[in-house]
Image (cartoon, coloured by chain):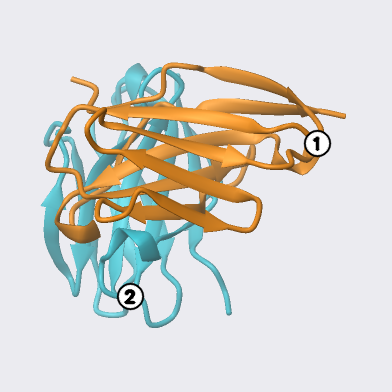
Chain colours: A cyan, B orange
């Protein structure tokens, strides 16, 4: 079966712009979580969606937002980009949200210049 | 406040020998622990997990040990193979895996042939 698909794979944006990243979970998976990976901080939890509802949210500013559609696909948006937002953004999906069932996508590498 | 700590950023081991990766945690509410492996340009892949009701879990060459009193877990890889060279992340969760994963910063393992 197809894995978790994240698009685009690479992105370069200018400071102050906004960006939208997309994640298509494994077919049948209803939970989608987003993580930010930076060299200094490891993987940090952004938010989790289950059946179109945000179930958990990490400690990130309001510039970071997300949503989930009825087909379980998810998008995350970052507005007013800052240089520090440069990171690998990872999406993970699972059937019911239990973390041991998570499958990660390959990520979107965002560079803010 | 780093709740999950991997104090060794890197580790080099000879092929065929044992690799031991360590992880410490501070939150006594964590009851489920996981190890993920990550290759460059790929998302993390699940390796092995352990519940707090156990002190050991084994899967082939991989064994995870949990010492709750010391709030410490370790991943043993025996024998180590060159294909094991990757970044290893320790992660923890509460409520039997129903809360977002908290990750360590990772340990880069290099297995030298």
Contact, CB < 8 Å: mark 2 with mark 1? no
The subunit carrying tag 2 is: A
Q: Is residue A85 left or right of residue B62?
A: left
Q: Is residue B43 visible?
A: no
Which residue matches tag 2?
A95
- Disc 1 sits on a residue from what chain? B
Instruction: Determine whether B44 is above or below B67 in the image.
Output: below
Residue A38, how many percent across, how many down? 42, 26
* Badge 1 density bin: few <14, some 14–19, many ≥20, Cα 10 Å: some
Circle 2 residues within 10 Å: few <14, some 14–19, many ≥20: some
Q: Give B97 or A94, whichever is nearer the viewer.
A: B97
Q: Find the residue positioned furthest to the right.
A: B113
Residue A9's spot in the image, x, y percent?
A: 56, 47
Residue B49 figure quarter: bottom left
User: Residue at horizontal 26%, vertical 73%?
Assistant: A96
The image shows residue A35 at horizontal and vertical percentages of 34, 43
Picture quarter containing residue A16?
top left
- Dividing the image into 4 quarters, which one contains the C terminus of chain B? top right
Q: Identify which residue is drawn at 45% across, 35% down.
A: B74
* Res B80 quadrant in image: top right
Quadrant for the N terminus of chain B in the image: top left
Secondary structure at numbered mark 2: loop
Q: Which residue is mark 1?
A: B16
Specify whether disc 2 shares its chain with disc 1: no
State the residue at coordinates (30%, 74%). A72
User: Foreground mark, 2 or 1?
Assistant: 1
Residue B101 relative to residue B113: left or right: left
Q: Circle 1 sits in a helix, a strand or a loop, which is it? A: loop
Compare residues B91 and B23 and report the one nearer the observer.
Answer: B23
Residue drawn at (25%, 55%) of the image: B53
């Amino acid at each position: 079966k197809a894995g978790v698909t994240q698009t685009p794979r690479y992105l370069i944006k200018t400071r102050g712009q906004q960006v939208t990243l997309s994640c298509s979970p494994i077919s049948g998976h209803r939970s989608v979580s987003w993580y930010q990976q930076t060299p200094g901080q490891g993987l940090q939890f952004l938010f989790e969606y289950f059946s179109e509802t945000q179930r958990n949210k990490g400690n990130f500013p309001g510039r970071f937002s997300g949503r989930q559609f009825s087909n379980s696909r998810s998008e995350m948006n970052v507005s007013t980009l800052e240089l520090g937002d440069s990171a690998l953004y990872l999406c993970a999906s699972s059937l019911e949200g239990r973390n041991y069932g998570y499958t990660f996508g390959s990520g979107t590498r965002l560079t803010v210049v | 406040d780093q709740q999950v700590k991997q104090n060794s950023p890197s580790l080099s081991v000879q092929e065929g020998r044992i690799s031991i990766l360590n992880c410490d945690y501070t939150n006594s509410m964590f009851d489920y622990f996981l190890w993920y492996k990550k290759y460059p340009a790929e998302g993390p892949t699940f390796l092995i997990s352990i519940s707090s009701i156990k002190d050991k879990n084994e899967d082939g060459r991989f064994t995870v040990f949990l010492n709750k009193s010391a709030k410490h877990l370790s991943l043993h890889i025996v024998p180590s193979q060159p294909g094991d060279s990757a970044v290893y992340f320790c992660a923890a969760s509460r409520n039997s895996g129903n809360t977002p994963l908290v990750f360590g910063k990772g340990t880069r393992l290099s297995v030298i042939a």
